[in-house]
Image: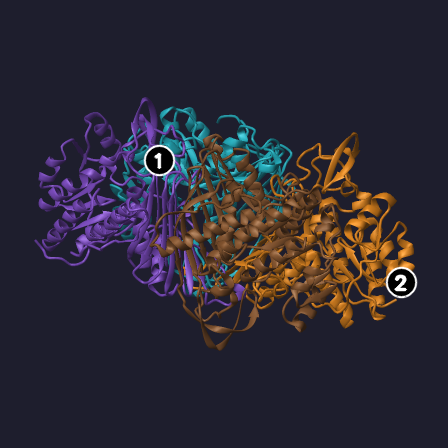
Chain colours: A brown, B cyan, C orange, D purple
Amino acid sequence: MAPRFFDLPFEPVMQVLSGRSGEALRSRREQLGWAESETDWRRLVERDDIDLIDICSPGDTHAEVALAALAAGKHVLCEKPLANTVAEASEMAVAAQNAASRGVFSMVGFSYRRVPAIAMARRLIAEGRVGQIRQVRVSYLQDWLSDPEAPMTWRLDKAKAGLGTLGDLGAHAIDLAQFVSGETVDAVSGLLHTFVTERPLLGKTVGLSGTASAERGTVTVGDVALVTGRLSGGGLASFEATRYATGRKNALRLEISGSIGAVAFDLERMNELEFYDAEAPPATAGFTRILVTEPEHPYLSAWWPAGHTLGYEHGFTHQVVDLLEAIAEGRQPEPSFDAGLQVQSVLAAVEASSEASGAWLTTDNPAKPREMS
Amino acid sequence: MAPRFFDLPFEPVMQVLSGRSGEALRSRREQLGWAESETDWRRLVERDDIDLIDICSPGDTHAEVALAALAAGKHVLCEKPLANTVAEASEMAVAAQNAASRGVFSMVGFSYRRVPAIAMARRLIAEGRVGQIRQVRVSYLQDWLSDPEAPMTWRLDKAKAGLGTLGDLGAHAIDLAQFVSGETVDAVSGLLHTFVTERPLLGKTVGLSGTASAERGTVTVGDVALVTGRLSGGGLASFEATRYATGRKNALRLEISGSIGAVAFDLERMNELEFYDAEAPPATAGFTRILVTEPEHPYLSAWWPAGHTLGYEHGFTHQVVDLLEAIAEGRQPEPSFDAGLQVQSVLAAVEASSEASGAWLTTDNPAKPREMS
Amino acid sequence: MAPRFFDLPFEPVMQVLSGRSGEALRSRREQLGWAESETDWRRLVERDDIDLIDICSPGDTHAEVALAALAAGKHVLCEKPLANTVAEASEMAVAAQNAASRGVFSMVGFSYRRVPAIAMARRLIAEGRVGQIRQVRVSYLQDWLSDPEAPMTWRLDKAKAGLGTLGDLGAHAIDLAQFVSGETVDAVSGLLHTFVTERPLLGKTVGLSGTASAERGTVTVGDVALVTGRLSGGGLASFEATRYATGRKNALRLEISGSIGAVAFDLERMNELEFYDAEAPPATAGFTRILVTEPEHPYLSAWWPAGHTLGYEHGFTHQVVDLLEAIAEGRQPEPSFDAGLQVQSVLAAVEASSEASGAWLTTDNPAKPREMS
Amino acid sequence: MAPRFFDLPFEPVMQVLSGRSGEALRSRREQLGWAESETDWRRLVERDDIDLIDICSPGDTHAEVALAALAAGKHVLCEKPLANTVAEASEMAVAAQNAASRGVFSMVGFSYRRVPAIAMARRLIAEGRVGQIRQVRVSYLQDWLSDPEAPMTWRLDKAKAGLGTLGDLGAHAIDLAQFVSGETVDAVSGLLHTFVTERPLLGKTVGLSGTASAERGTVTVGDVALVTGRLSGGGLASFEATRYATGRKNALRLEISGSIGAVAFDLERMNELEFYDAEAPPATAGFTRILVTEPEHPYLSAWWPAGHTLGYEHGFTHQVVDLLEAIAEGRQPEPSFDAGLQVQSVLAAVEASSEASGAWLTTDNPAKPREMS
């Protein structure tokens, strides 16, 4: 969609779709409109006609693919979380810095940054409209594990998914809190918890979950993460990531309270942003429901007339636009692998705090300038 | 409640509760805390120790009681609609004007004017915050007749209730539209319709409806009123009053759109007012949900801290406060019987238009200054 | 998008984009990804490699283009309203019936039928979940004419746009009321009104409106339409179409109240449908906010996991899917030109009623079977 | 109001209002309708004509007054939190148990238990409608300290207010979580934080805050409490209590997610309860907004017709009703001082956890049966 609505510096060509299984891959390639398919990603990296690689595989494969791609001079867009461990993420961040010095760029796919209402919230805060930030609250609520008979998927397997709900949903929560507030989470106290430890093995994938088979597997990641944090500006943060919030399907909610204002957002109503201006006269103060569909709003001038809403996929469209523009201009796209690493370090601190009975741990921000290798 | 939260000019004494049936009346009197009860309202009017009479009986009795009370020098608070016909209402309005010249005052019980969010909407419009009014929409939605087996009550009998849904709910809708906008409805085109024409006779009253008996009675009033109107300022109005809005229990909704702003209200969320300021910057414009519980809001300084909400009955509390203050200051309380007559004339025009196949009829405002008799 | 998410019977090729101005057309063609552009639509109709023509030009051109295309054996998708007059629409409907008998099909672009929540509302009603329909309310609220200095566009010129707000927004309102209820609007009483009769001529188009020039033009269409209607099943309908609902950007709202249930929808929250089940136990009855993103919902199994929302454009995607499937199966796509003609006749009756001071007029449904020519 | 709407076992007489300052007390007594006033509460306790004492003074006085009143054979209603320390609360609980054995009863004023929607949520959970409880979230959000120049009040002074926001708002949050879920909070990890440590001293009290003087005082209580907890049934809880949630005036929010359902509530919309039934068919599942105004709902049969809402004060009305009924029937009213003590012990554990860097501490439920003294 990106080239149809935005003036892009390049005309993207969807050349090769890579995957494991030959048959499924071929039919998927056709449906999605890729020119070719390929089961060995290494061959992809070697090809001269590929400029950009988009890594959407499970987290345990990110580092290997990204390192190879960057080494081969390909730009990389890597799905979040950046990796399954801080060690992998660090290696990737170093490789990304090196590549960037050669004009080869990389970006992490925190696509919710590109939801216009989220970008608008960040703009309001950057403009000082909420003042000093006191509290940030982010919860990412889903419910597809509420049913104890919902089957195992790779997302529940620590070997593949790393941090489970914390890595999948919590990574978005942490990134958004930092992106919108413009601050970092510098210390955390956290709890990870698994409600259902054994689940039927997967028969067939359906949506995020799937159908069950008779055998059972062990859930090795957390179902729920509850986190309290301290922000770099002196404020407090609280996070919840769960797949047990019965009735909440994709409720990524954010509320930031500051000394002179507040913003509130819910992904289930992604075209709306609520803004409270504490400096308004008391008789007319209140949360204003901004329908983020005006040409004055981020990304919106490219789309429909006011009031015509966007959906989930448009965050990805905007991500492609931002990435290609940065590449064309020879500047580092955001969020960089450094930013991905920093989120990873917060997640790692949460996991460590949970194992240390909720002790407060610093996130030891590793995304500071370091020596190029 | 009024004397507990407001500084009243009088200490009201609840002296006599009047009604038809002796037994029910006595137990009711006790529960409600009246000093005495009385089955003959005429004796009430004759007593010297009664200063104010509150008429809450069905509409067909309003005129007789009010005229007698005013003649006897009693202040009168009369439930809406003022009467069942324009003729009765006219007679009452004349009597009220005469009484007022002797310092005896009367008021119609359009209690929703005293809901703080409604009073706040009026204030915003009076201050010019919505600009020139283009459109007014008021719907009063209830659903207690959705079930065709819901029984007959006096509210469905034209002899007692006059105009049915139009008189009961529509009167509120018309009054609010005029009160909040500060304009009058000068012409109407309307439709009255009855969906269920026979209903089981009432066994016992329960809430607004009741339990059924085996016999059936004929519904002689409209179930639904749909009205289009022209406002004195050049704008348009639309009204709906219905008891068939399945799932809506008491949704009196008002939205007023003007050249530079708008207000929106729903009685089911009576502590909230939505305000749109079209002069705000486009990027932050939107409907602001004002929680009308601040000391700056009408009536609120007498109540709880901000954020602590009021309920249905507080409109009546405020009505008593406003009435007693006006009487103490020797000025005409609003809404006067003239205002009640004017609403009555709009209702009558709607009924006539419905009978004339939706023809536009002027409401022939009878509330203009006239000769004192 | 359609071929990427749905299994289509054809692989659509975007061959020729047609328009008036050469330069704008060329740049638009490139951006939108069409293979060629063409300034003379007649040449398009003559080409053998074109199977389907999508008519998106102003209403005054629909009939000529559609008739030529159908005569040339091209399938036709025509933007709503079908035409600017009933006469044109009738001619188109006859041509469409003739073409259909030769396997050449046509469809009107009432794209909101394809919003999943709308399709779901229709399904619930078809399944009897709201019972006998008592009241239908549809309002289509926009505000881009609130500002009297908003410029003239072709949409305000009767010669081009036919019925103004009534034709543009009101056509959607009427179609949705009928589509969701499964009934027809058989009689209407209506009012068309123009608040601002002179506006600055358009400098440059921006969104739905544009920038102003110094000259002024005359608005020859209605700004607002207020309509009361009678439904074929005995219920009542009320419609409002306006571009003066300050603060409402694209609020197409529908509420249908029946004997045992109700549905409510607002296009500004297009992924949600509210459903009230009057047969639920009173203690837990209420409007249920259904997030229409489950695989069980219309069109949704092709899209994202539950909770991931769709936007405005997806109605058009679904429209293409439904059209191509019908063509492939050799059956009449819905809504047919007959359906478009029937809506047109309702709009014409509204206009005539407004001219006849709100008189009730039958819509004289012309979409009944007739002789093939 | 209680005797006007409910059949009470007693006719309450408002006999004596007690306070410190003679002048303010007298005028307050008059306005509120008490027969007498008294500046020495000890004399009150000695009077034979007083049956029930309602303690509404700051938390540091609760224990002394309650112990004296119970010893003198007066029933006691004590405002929450029960005391400022667990030691005081324990002494009160023992005294209350002893008094109860003599037919003298006591109750803590957790009035929000009496909000009908809250009582309805508890009923649904008790009936098994949400299944096994996985997560409880309660936040109590106010914003009257957002402004650093908002003045000191006794609520910010540890000597008077004990636990600050945690004791004032957090006590409600903990009590509601336990009351609605039917479980106890058995372990906690918490953080207390003070954003603004110096504030202008109070000139005059206005609402919950007041006007400022030139001098400054030190805030000695926490502004914000963030708590993670473990429930007795194996679920997790998270709590937030803050007076810095800019724009939130009195948002006591609760959401409970269970294996087959969920409930959600917000005190700013106190007449509504949202209920999600995970066993409903997927196509019509969703949160149902129950307007808690039906005769089938707790407390509601005594009030208005369906759809007519209640306000903040009605929780107190219901509290009086429940208290008097329990006294009349000679049974322990709920919540007892034991329940108040148990909440106090949770609050104490939160405070201790905060001092111990977030360590998990058991709440060591002291409300179990113990030896009578």
- C-alpha distance separating marks 1 and 2: 74 Å
Q: Which quarter of the figure is the N terminus of chain C placed in?
A: bottom right
Residue A305 seen by the camera: no
Q: Which residue is mark 2?
A: C71
Label 1: chain letter: B
Placement of B94 over or under C343, stated as above or below: above
* Same chain? Circles 1 and 2: no
Q: Residue at x 25, y 53 (%)?
A: D363
Q: Which residue is mark 1?
A: B303
Residue A69 position within the rendered picture, expressed as x and y whole percent measured from the top left: 64, 56
Give the class, few, some or many, for how many residues have Cα within 10 Å of label 2's Cα (few <14, many ≥20): some
Give the amino acid at mark 2.
Answer: Ala
Q: Nearer the viewer, residue D255 or B80?
A: D255
Give the amino acid at mark 1.
Answer: Trp
Q: Nearer the viewer, residue C121 or A81?
A: A81
Marker count (numbered): 2
Residue B227 position within the rendered picture, expressed as x and y whole percent measured from the top left: 60, 46
Placement of C64 over or under B360, stated as above or below: below
Q: Residue at x 50, y 48 (%)?
A: A342
Q: From the viewer's perspective, tell me whether residue B165 is left or right of residue D160.
A: right
Q: Which quarter of the figure is the C terminus of chain C placed in?
A: bottom right
